[in-house]
Amino acid sequence: MSLTTPSPTASEHPVPSRAWTRLTNPGPEELEKIAKRLDLHPLVIDDLLAGRQQPKAESFDGQLYLSIWDIDRGDEGTTMTDTDLALILTADELVLVQRGDTAEFRDLDALLEGPGAVSVDSPLAAAHRVLDAVVRDFVELGAAVEKDLDNLETEVFDSRVREDYRRIYRLRQRIGQIDRASSGLAEALRQSGDHIARLTEQQPHLRPYFAHLANDARGVSELTSTEHESLDALVSSHQSNVGTRQNKDMRTISAFAALLAIPTVIAGIYGMNFKNLPLVRWEYGWLVTGIAIVVIDVIAFTLFRRRGWLGEHADADE
């Protein structure tokens, strides 16, 4: 079993008769050592040095290179971290390369050393353990988003609730992040299907696990795509609600302006310097004029109220 020289950014853990190696934010020198030891293709090293890559799978002379986006739910399931994870799988060794903020890395050490449905007794089994953890997080995140969508849908179609646009925007961000990562992983697993099939010829007991893994990845990818469409429909409904509320506000403002305009117009007429205006020379003319203003305003208020321009009404005509 061959092991690389320990470094501050690399950790290595042996498994029975095999080895897996984990590198965190490796530099050119570390990658060069791994490349020479495993005879890696230069394109793999170029991708790892370039940084964030689109999720993909490539095969080079018996080596499988998987580049994915790892979204970890965290211990409490309330936060999401997004880092890059690359798997270089050969018949004799698995190399894991994590890139990003080290504080957000998935704890692969505990994952590979802990118990699981599949015993980590080979590089292929170790790769399954890592990929399975990633997919399970995608499934749980997709289910959580589905619940949030249901709650948001209830708010959008409830006239008594004014939905929070910031919550909609945050949910759109989450769905987009999960959608891109899960669809990329599903496509990478599909592309690597033939290579994994060849590797499982020596370990046929792993075939159903990888098939189940691919199905789960494809399922969560389809789910998040559907959630994206559902959110688009909710956003349209939200925009319609905003437009409706703005129209209602404009009608209310117009109704109040009309109520204020009635006494203003009447007062303006009687403020003109004409001697033959009705009720001008009568002692109680001012009182009759005031009562007329109030009566006209009350009639106008009642009409506006019935039309729903001034608050809710049972017969409101929206």
Image: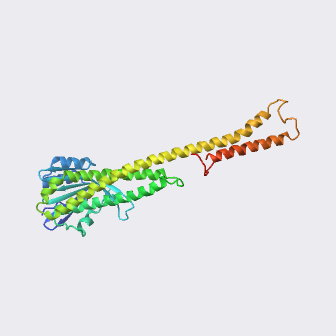
The front one of 260 and 189 is: 260
The front one of 65 and 221 is: 221
Question: Residue 217's quadrant in the figure?
Answer: bottom left
Q: Estimate the x, y position of residue 110 in percent, counting from the top left.
A: 27, 66
Q: Estimate the x, y position of residue 254 in percent, counting from the top left.
A: 63, 41
Q: Estimate the x, y position of residue 111 in percent, counting from the top left.
A: 26, 65
Q: Which residue does the image show at 68% across and 46% down from the upper left?
A: 302
Q: Which residue does the image show at 34% across and 61% down from the upper left?
A: 140
Apparent side of residue 234 relative to residue 115 in the rendered image (left or right): right
Residue 298 appears in the picture as rendered: yes
Q: Name the quadrant of the C terminus.
A: top right
Q: Which residue does the image show at 39% across and 50% down from the upper left?
A: 230
Apparent side of residue 247 relative to residue 297 in the rendered image (left or right): left
Residue 23 appears in the picture as rendered: no
Q: Estimate the x, y position of residue 22 in percent, counting from the top left.
A: 22, 59
The number of numbered badges drawn on the structure is 0
